[in-house]
Amino acid sequence: MTKEKIKDAVYTRRYIYNFHYHLIWVTKYRNKTFTTDALANEMKEILSGIAEANKIVIENMEVMPDHVHMLISFPPSKAPTSAIKALKGRSAYMFLKRHPEIRQSQYWGGHLWSPSYYMSTLGNMSKDVVERYINDQKYNETKKRPNGTL
């Protein structure tokens, strides 16, 4: 007889976990930096590489002109703050190094991201609700009312 596996859980030799974090952070001064698909895709590639190197699984991600939404998971041995530090710190360094013109025009202080962030575990909201919310980001951006609100 085989035991039934827990849906969305990650099984390792040492433990089983089912952590999903919704993470949002914004650019410094809410500058609209990722205004082209090329820049947004470049940041997605940077974040994907950092995540892989740090054993962070990106379940869903959207890079908007002035902020990033992610649904991530990582082992319980990693502190949430260390995951955020790796993603934000390394991505800023790599992106601004590749784009000195953006650093000079928008981020002369050398900081791509605002120091704050939002992070929640998926408790009240199901994973599907968060994924749908992230997937709808691009659609919602184009549907803004003339006064700039959703």
Image (cartoon, grey):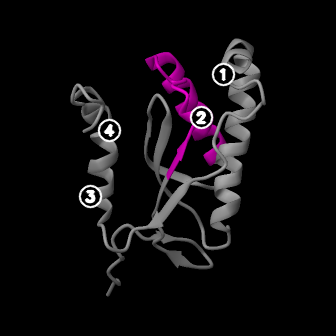
| Marked residue nearer the N-terminal end (2 or 1) | 2
As shown in the figure, which amino acid type bears the numbered disc 4? Gln
Q: CA distance from mark 1 to mark 4?
A: 24 Å
Depth order, front residue of 6/88: 88
Residue type indicated by callout 1: Gln
Label 3's element?
helix
- In space, the residues marked 2 and 1 are separated at their CA atoms by 9 Å
Amino acid, disc 2: Tyr
Identify the mark at residue 106; answer none if there is no mark: 1
Q: Is residue 138 above or below residue 97?
A: below
Q: What residue did someone put label 4 on?
A: 137
Q: Which residues are magenta?
A: 24-51
Disc assigned to residue 129: 3
Q: Nearer the viewer, mark 1 or mark 4?
A: 1
First along the sequence among labels 2 and 3: 2
- Find out whether residue 137 is within the magenta segment: no
Answer whether labels 2 and 1 touch (C-beta < 8 Å): yes
Q: In the drawing, does residue 111 fall left or right of residue 41? A: right
Q: Residues within 10 Å of mark 3 (few under 14, many from 20)?
A: few
Amino acid type shown at disc 3: Val
- Residue 106 horizontal/vertical position (percent): 66, 21
Looking at the image, is mark 3 or mark 1 earlier in the sequence? 1
